[in-house]
């Protein structure tokens, strides 16, 4: 590839980017797209004059840049800040690397050999890589020094970020005073006993061994069978709301729906406004409804102080490590309920199975990949599938098939990776959404690094991959030979895949199209209300992959750095904008993505150093190679230091902080309030995981509507205390169906309330 | 090698063994060897009639076999039981393996090829290995089935042992009620502060954060400078005792020595009998003597309950994981004091350095080894060192040089390994003797497995070793080719090295010779009193290496199994005898050698299976190879199960057990006594590590002697309460010297007391 071609490609891509960004700045001002681009903050979407709506403006960039870290922390949570810091770190280190490498190394590479230099635009890109430097060149020490500087500064910056994020994590811990999860321990593997229920077993155990700090408990119930009925009920309810929706202008009064969902059409039940229902029986009702035979061997145990909960979660309870397994409970919104009722002793085997599964998937993925790349050979294709001969005779069709289809297929295959990894992570049995996403993030990261970086460099089929793995000694040499050659590919990869992915992230193409289809083709009223949480498991691996490319190419093929730097700047603006406007932070890991990012960065650095060592070896420069070895050792020592000094803070909470918080709360008399809220916090409603969140936001506008036509009659009920089960219109229904119906409605009301307060 | 040769060799070795055992049974009855063979239980050594003394008898074998596990546990501690269980496990599994392989596989191997069979005694040993089986043989499934049976039974037995030892560990924990270590947390990395001492920092911190359970603390003092003076004092004392020793028949009365050790010969000081001294000021004196400028950033913190200590030791204390680092304190006798005053933040770097050091040592060890093996080539030697030509012309000298010296040199080199690994482990900075020995045990184990097993099989110089490491895929194939060939070597290794090492262990050659030299050449009075604790770091790796040989050779070359079985039977008898009679259990890891033994066994099994897989591959038997793969997976799953189910019990103590123990003590009112004993338990005396234990045992006989001749005068002092510093004869000495002297003497008395009670 020539420099000119690269610049053309870059120009085209920059043009496309500018086009997309302008498009975005127009589209976001259209009122019909408010839900797509301002999912998390609808209030901001105000009507603008028509002209302004169709003029592109960079105001969103300014707003995205103006947002401070504190604002980001408050709006989008600690994970968003971590993501932001990863971008900041990348921008800093690659700015330095770009300056050093472009002005220091690029000329050295270019004039590395005595050769006739053509005009720069038509020079081959390979003349800019280290491949162009003569063997035994005296100038290789410059590469070595630059490697030292980049590694040193990267370690320094990494340490800064690590300390900063650890401080933020502790600060976040101290700030979020009222999180019930800090007082709650999730106990699993409660031993089964014929003469007492799980509930009394938990009570006995904790009263016996943790009496001073034990508060109460809540046994987890398996709602598998009920759930189906409830889901049916809910679907019916939403349908019924959509098609019969007529507003009645008397809000905040009890409302009675006909009980069409229980199969007995002549009965109806009251839907109490939220406040009343909460006042009447604050959540105790749910646990009353639990049938004893549904109990799981898991329970939430509440403690009087945070420190007590921490202790119980960290200490081995009994002499059987598979029984009475304790860990701090996730937040209520973060709970992944359906995994809670998996038997604990199954988990280790699930772990191994999914690990094996994802490794196998990682290796066999290239099977279809290489098959598809076979499409580029038109002749082979025609031989294999003779009936295609007619079709492939046209002028444009062959070009399309060979030039475009393979990459489309490959992209489609690549799009299946995150969901599949997410599936693996689900099967693993995590008990929280955040844990599941974190686990999927790791899997996607390994997959990406392996399949984009190593496989491209080692250019291999499965056999080649396995060969490479089985002779690890040769890998650095192979990489050293391949990277200067593959740098061109990686540069174009940054231009196309990197920039393009940012544009598509910003445009939210899927949401946009779905919104359009919904509004103008399906003609549904109201907006689409799918609000996602940020897909860390797809975006973090991308950013980290570009970091890896940046490190490995920096000294060897520095031409990639300016393009990479543009990518990171763009990413910084785009992702901040998305955090502020688009995504909704339903759950948070508390900064646990940072160790992943940190480990990957250290891996990238050490890999770079090993590759450089091999390159210096190939270039027969013993001095440069010799000086690279201490650098590797120093980097590993730095890593070990960080693991000792900072990593423990991401694994547990320090006692000092928790005890101080407990004391503060006791001093201010807040403890009793917190204790009262605990039992409610983990009240188990029908599985939230499988309920589409559609309709949550709209409920703020049409929550007071009541259907009054057709077979369903809308009457105004009287404000009546007590359980709905005593209501006369519910007579004649089987009790368990009634219970189901009530629970499902109570849950929906809670959802509505959440929609209101958000 | 022919079968006949092997049998001859076995016969010779058996004869030698019988000779050595008979010799032992005679030597042990000689009164002058009592200290060598009955170090830990002198009471047993009673005088016998002269004739009986010189007739070999197997009574010791009977006694060794009669000893029950409980007795072993009570006499020699949990580690000895673990060692014993490893032997029992080996005997069981290799009995089964021997039966299956000798009767099932050996005939198959022998008749594996259509060939002319010579008489068995002159048949090559290789006809008994799997190498003799034809390719594509239909009989390979037998090997596969036997492999399955051995692996299955091994897993079953391992699980039994694991559960048994875990139960013993818990039982041991519950039994040893009064261990002060369970109430004590060792805090390291106490932050330095200009305005308060370490002592008040510890007090403030624990009063603030652990007030309900905090009892008291004891700051560790660095006794580096003092120590030298003390050592000088002690040496002078011992000398003075040896040469001037005259017994005075009034025991249990205060005794005054002239203070020759302080350089002022006209003064003397009293040596109070133990009981009085203890009664007068029970150890508070020691801490009074500590000078403030010697404080280290480490302290023992005592808690009211075991559970509280466990909590503090397991929870991260502050937001800086390098400060206030807590762990449960080792036992008093187990403390390795001189490592206590290493700064905590140095440790991680020491860990890495010693790890690197021992890996390098492991690889370069073969440097001298191969050089020595070069001695076998006489011509090369004569070329290199021409002056040897004259010497090497004799008849016997060349045979000696080529046949005997290399193996002697190699053995000498091998003898240096455990001390060097022990040195590495010391440098690592462990705070207890048991931890140090455990760490050395691991290092020696890796070294042995690598340098005896792999290097012999891969038959390599350093370059070959590195080559093998860098292409791990080829290792199984290489092993599969080499093991049937190397089986002969391993068999002779078992015969010579295994059996011989047991004989030398039993004979205690070093102690015997030293005892002889001491008594009859140096003409010292009294016995030699070096009583060691059991050298787990040399013996456990040996036993585990033989286990590895047994597993890997079982299916492939079963002829080794009978010899191995004899080794394990012998080892069972010998080591039990040594535990009962010879070694003194000063410290105990509480069964922590078991996970090492378990891991090695699992490693051996998986390695065996992988090698078998490769052999089946080489023999082109896809069925057998195919069936071996699930076996590997099943074994790894079993391993994972044990790690989840049982390993945590070896890492920490379960809360339930500790809380029950605390309650029991509270109920019986023992808690106050225990609390009072705590402070004394970790009273810091001059470094015990560097003091030779010589003289401890003799003190039981000559403790009441008092010197009365020459410049030292022996007077009977009056029983006087209070500190010795007020004694009139001590006036005129600098206070710090007095303190030193008193401390050193107090320490010696404590040693004497221990000698008495043992």
Image: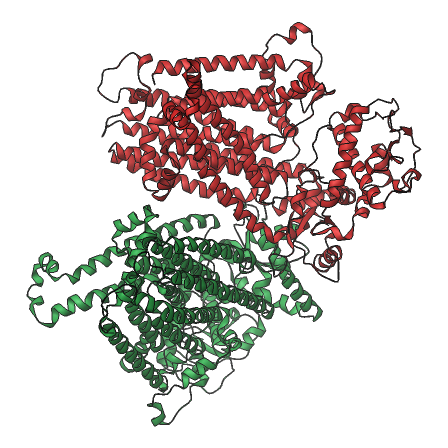
Chain colours: A green, B red
Residue placed most toward the observer, B162 or B601: B601
B87 above or below A663? Answer: above
Q: Position of residue B552 (x, y in %)?
A: 39, 30
Q: Position of residue B522 (x, y in %)?
A: 69, 20
**Residue at 66% in and 68% down:** A672
Residue A279 at least partly seen: yes
**Residue closest to the far top:** B51
Q: Position of residue A53 (x, y in %)?
A: 35, 90
Quadrant housing residue B33:
top right
Q: Quadrant of the N terminus of chain A?
A: bottom left
Quadrant housing residue A606:
bottom left
**Residue at 35% in and 79% down:** A243
Residue A705 at least partly seen: no
The number of numbered discs placed on residues in the rendered structure image is 0
Residue placed most toward the observer, B314 or A474: A474
**Residue at 31% in and 18% down:** B124
Query: Viewed as shown, does residue B265 lie left or right of A233?
Result: right
Residue placed most toward the observer, B630 or A128: A128
Query: Viewed as shown, does residue B435 lie left or right of B685?
Result: left
A613 above or below B144? Answer: below
Quadrant housing residue A361:
bottom left
Q: Position of residue A124 (x, y in %)?
A: 23, 68
Residue placed most toward the observer, A672 or B264: B264
A445 above or below B337? Answer: below
Query: Viewed as shown, does residue B733 lie left or right of A43?
Result: right
């Amino acid at each position: 590839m020539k420099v000119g071609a690269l610049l053309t490609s870059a120009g085209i891509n920059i043009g496309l980017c500018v086009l997309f960004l302008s498009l975005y700045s127009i589209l976001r001002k259209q009122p019909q797209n408010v839900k797509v681009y301002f999912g998390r903050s609808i209030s901001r979407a105000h009507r603008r004059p028509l002209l302004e709506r169709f003029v592109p403006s960079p105001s969103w960039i300014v707003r995205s840049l103006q947002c401070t870290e504190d604002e980001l922390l408050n709006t989008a949570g600690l994970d968003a800040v971590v993501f932001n810091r990863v971008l900041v770190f990348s921008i800093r280190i690659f700015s330095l690397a770009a300056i050093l490498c472009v002005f220091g190394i690029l000329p050295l590479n270019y004039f590395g050999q005595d050769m006739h230099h053509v005009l720069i635009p038509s020079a081959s890109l390979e003349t800019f890589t280290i491949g162009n430097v003569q063997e035994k060149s005296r100038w290789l020490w410059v590469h070595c020094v630059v490697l030292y500087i980049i590694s040193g500064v990267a370690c320094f910056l990494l340490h800064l970020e690590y300390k900063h994020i650890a401080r933020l994590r502790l600060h976040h811990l101290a700030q979020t005073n009222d999180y019930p999860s800090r007082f709650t321990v999730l106990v699993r593997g409660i031993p089964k006993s014929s003469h007492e229920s799980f509930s009394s077993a938990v009570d006995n155990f904790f009263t016996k061994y943790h009496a001073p700090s034990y508060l109460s408990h809540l046994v987890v119930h398996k709602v598998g069978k009920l759930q189906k009925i409830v889901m049916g009920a809910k679907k019916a309810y939403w349908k019924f709301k959509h098609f019969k929706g007529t507003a009645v202008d008397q809000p905040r009064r009890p409302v009675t729906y006909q009980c069409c969902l229980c199969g007995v059409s002549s009965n109806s039940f009251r839907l109490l406004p939220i406040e009343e229902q909460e006042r009447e029986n604050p959540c105790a009702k749910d646990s009353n409804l639990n049938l004893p035979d549904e109990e799981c061997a898991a329970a939430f145990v509440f403690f009087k102080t945070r420190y007590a909960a921490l202790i119980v979660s960290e200490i081995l309870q009994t002499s059987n490590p598979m029984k009475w397994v304790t860990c701090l409970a996730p937040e209520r919104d973060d709970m992944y309920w359906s995994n809670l009722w998996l038997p604990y002793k199954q988990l280790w085997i699930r772990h191994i199975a999914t690990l094996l599964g994802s490794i196998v998937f990682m290796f066999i993925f290239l099977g279809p990949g290489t098959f598809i790349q076979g499409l580029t050979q038109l002749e082979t294709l025609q031989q294999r599938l003779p009936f295609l001969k007619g079709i492939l005779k046209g002028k444009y069709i062959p070009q399309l098939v060979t030039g475009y289809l393979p990459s489309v297929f490959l992209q489609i295959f690549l799009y299946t990776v995150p969901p599949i990894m997410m599936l693996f992570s689900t099967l693993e049995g995590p008990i929280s959404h955040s844990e599941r996403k974190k686990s999927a993030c790791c899997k996607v990261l390994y997959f990406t690094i392996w399949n984009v970086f190593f496989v491209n460099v080692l250019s291999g089929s499965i056999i080649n991959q396995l060969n490479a793995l089985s002779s690890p000694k040769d890998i650095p040499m192979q990489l050293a030979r391949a990277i200067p050659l593959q740098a061109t590919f990686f540069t174009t990869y940054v231009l196309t895949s990197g920039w393009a992915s940012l544009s598509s992230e910003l445009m939210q193409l899927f949401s946009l199209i779905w919104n359009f289809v919904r509004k103008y083709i399906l003609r549904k009223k109201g907006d689409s209300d799918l609000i996602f949480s940020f897909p860390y498991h797809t975006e973090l691996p991308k950013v980290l992959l570009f970091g890896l490319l940046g490190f490995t190419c920096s000294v060897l093929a520095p031409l990639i750095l300016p393009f990479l730097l543009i990518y990171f700047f763009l990413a910084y603006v785009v992702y901040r904008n998305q955090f502020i406007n688009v995504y909704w932070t339903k759950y948070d890991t508390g900064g646990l993505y940072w160790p992943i990012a940190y480990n990957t960065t250290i891996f990238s650095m050490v890999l770079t150093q090993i590759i450089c060592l091999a390159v210096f070896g190939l270039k027969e420069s013993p001095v440069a190679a010799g000086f690279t070895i201490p650098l590797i050792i120093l980097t590993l020592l730095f890593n070990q230091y960080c693991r000792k000094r900072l990593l423990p803070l991401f694994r547990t909470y320090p006692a000092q902080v928790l005890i101080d918080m407990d004391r503060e709360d006791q001093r201010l008399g807040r403890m009793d309030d917190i204790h009262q809220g605990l039992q409610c916090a983990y009240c188990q409603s029908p599985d939230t995981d499988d309920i589409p969140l559609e309709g949550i936001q709209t409920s703020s506008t049409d929550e007071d509507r009541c259907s009054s036509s057709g077979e369903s009659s809308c009457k105004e009920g009287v404000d009546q205390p007590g359980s709905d089960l005593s209501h006369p219109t519910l007579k004649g229904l089987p009790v368990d169906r009634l219970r189901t119906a009530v629970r499902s409605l109570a849950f929906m009301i809670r959802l509505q309330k959440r929609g209101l307060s958000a």
